[in-house]
Image (spheres, rainbow, N blue to C red):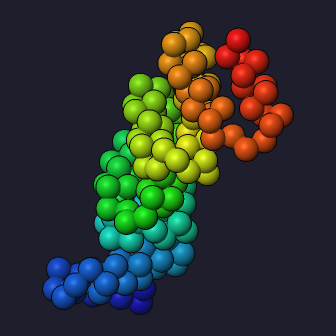
Amino acid sequence: DIRSLVQMIELRLPAASNDDERREMLRRVSELKDERLHDDAGAFDALAKRLPLDPEDASTRERFIEIGKRLGRHADVVAVLSESADKAARGPIRAEILMQLAATCEHALVDSARAETEYRKVIETDPTDPAIVLPASVELARLYTSRSAYSELADVLGVQVKLEESLEKRAALCKRLG
């Protein structure tokens, strides 16, 4: 029986000898609860424990966010994504997690101040990488425009001008700057 298997794995979890073993056990528990038992709350809790152990696993992150939205556990999603971003080893992965975190803050928690902070962290991840900076700066520009924060908007548009490779887009940004 699936429930018994899940219980057995969960009982063995505290005795896991390392993070790899713990991660694998949590993967199994989350999959069984999600796919076989259709237990969203249980799958969410297992994924919340697993994600900080393996922040680079994009499919786990996506599934976690999806279930969290369905359950309305947005604050928990934000907390786990924040912890996962802190543990992410590579800049692009950290930036990706922070973008998801910022979007959740902005749209689900309706906390644009926190979203702004997280978008700024994305830029700080690697201020010279257009692939990291441009998406976050576009979101910041949108936030600044919506609250008429023209000084901050000018700063972020300046960053975009420096990093944008497309001449057409740079010209449009310069025109926007005035």
* Camera-side residue of 16 and 5: 16
Residue shown at the point (48%, 61%) measured from the top left: 93
Q: Is residue 12 left or right of residue 73?
A: left
Q: Residue at x 83, y 34 (%)?
A: 168
Please state the total of marks drawn on the protein image. 0
Residue 78 as seen in the image, left or right of residue 160: left
Which part of the image, by quadrant, shows the C terminus? Answer: top right
35 relative position to 109: left or right: right
Q: Is residue 119 visible?
A: yes
- In the image shown, does 172 or 1 lie closer to the viewer? 172
Provide residue 115's location: percent of width, then percent of height. Answer: 45, 33
Residue 56 position within the rendered picture, expressed as x and y whole percent measured from the top left: 46, 68
Residue occupying image coordinates x 41% and y 25%: 113
Give x and y (percent) for residue 70. 53, 50
Quadrant occupied by the N terminus: bottom left
Q: Quadrant of residue 49?
A: bottom left
Q: Is residue 66 above or below residue 133?
A: below
User: Is residue 39 visible in the rendered structure shown here?
Assistant: no
Residue at (47%, 26%) from the top-left corner? 112
